[in-house]
Image (cartoon, grey):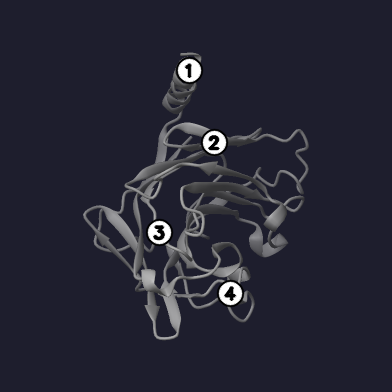
């Protein structure tokens, strides 16, 4: 009974907090094509400057491995000959936010080698580089670890394999749509899955190396294949789709 009570309290607190914030932007994917006044496409394999997109990923990003239908964005990863194709979109230079509650409702691609993600990068990445710019991974899933969700923050003080991160066991998370949220203010970033708190990062040290989260960040969506984090790829699972219902930002 105590567990049920405190779960109710936490959910009530989250609901009350949500009511204090107002919707400031939403991407509902209701059109027939992406809004290019908001979204950019990443293309290619990251070469020559960031081959494998920094993680030895195996996909080549295109502008065609996606579609909009019935209010949903479908990002499709395919095996094409001796390589994989997929899509990565971002709002760099067009849409960014400092603080707020960032929520995506999505259905995961699944199978060995897939790596769908919704994340944010600091606007100053071109000036200071990664990881000093900061990275907020609201949702990461890798098919090699079924039933688990990763929520991660990369900073100069803690990045890559040593990032501030939490792995949460969520059996059957691959089934249906779920909501993934980062609630970010000047003091902390809290992560939720379907309104359940899974991780909070609130360091006392607010130096640039530890807390680069005092500036605007832009948004990214992608479906990567393999690589350092995605792992070995089972080529028999393709095609796979990462399906996004909406992205909403509250402040």
Report the Cα–Cα distance between label 4 and label 1.
44 Å
Any mark on residue 110, and which?
Answer: 3
Report the Cα–Cα distance between label 2 and label 1.
15 Å
Numbered disc 4: secondary structure: helix
Residue position marked by numbered label 2 in the rendering: 198
- Image check: 80 left or right of 213? left
Q: Residue 152: x percent and y percent?
A: 60, 48
- Image check: 248 left or right of 233? left
Residue position marked by numbered label 4 in the rendering: 52
Numbered disc 2: secondary structure: strand
Numbered disc 3: secondary structure: loop
In the displayed structure, 14 sits above or below 208; it is above
- Contact, mark 3 vs mark 2 (Cβ under 8 Å): no
Q: Quadrant of residue 172?
A: top left
Closer mark to the observer between disc 4 and disc 2: 2
Ranked by sequence position, the earlier of labels 4 and 3 is 4
Report the Cα–Cα distance between label 3 and label 1.
33 Å
């Amino acid at each position: 009974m105590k567990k049920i009570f405190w779960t109710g309290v936490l959910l009530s607190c989250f609901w009350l907090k949500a009511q204090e914030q107002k919707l400031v932007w939403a991407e509902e994917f209701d059109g027939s094509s992406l809004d290019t006044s908001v979204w950019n496409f990443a293309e290619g394999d990251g070469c020559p400057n960031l081959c494998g997109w920094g993680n030895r990923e195996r996909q080549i990003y295109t502008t065609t491995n996606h579609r909009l239908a019935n209010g949903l964005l479908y990002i499709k990863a395919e095996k094409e000959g001796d390589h994989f194709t997929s899509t990565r979109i971002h709002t760099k230079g067009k849409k960014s936010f400092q603080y707020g509650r960032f929520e995506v409702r999505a259905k995961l691609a699944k199978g060995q080698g897939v790596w769908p993600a919704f994340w944010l990068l600091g606007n100053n990445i071109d000036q200071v580089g990664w990881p000093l710019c900061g990275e907020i991974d609201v949702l990461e899933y890798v098919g090699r670890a079924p039933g688990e969700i990763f929520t991660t923050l990369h900073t100069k003080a803690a990045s890559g394999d040593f990032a501030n991160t939490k792995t949460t066991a969520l059996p059957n998370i691959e089934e249906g749509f779920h909501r993934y949220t980062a609630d970010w203010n000047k003091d902390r970033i809290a992560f939720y899955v379907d309104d359940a708190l899974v991780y909070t990062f609130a360091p006392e040290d607010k130096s640039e190396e530890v807390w680069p989260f005092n500036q605007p960040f832009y948004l990214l969506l992608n479906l990567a294949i393999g690589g350092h984090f995605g792992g070995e790829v089972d080529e028999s699972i393709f095609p796979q789709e990462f399906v996004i219902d909406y992205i909403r930002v509250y402040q």
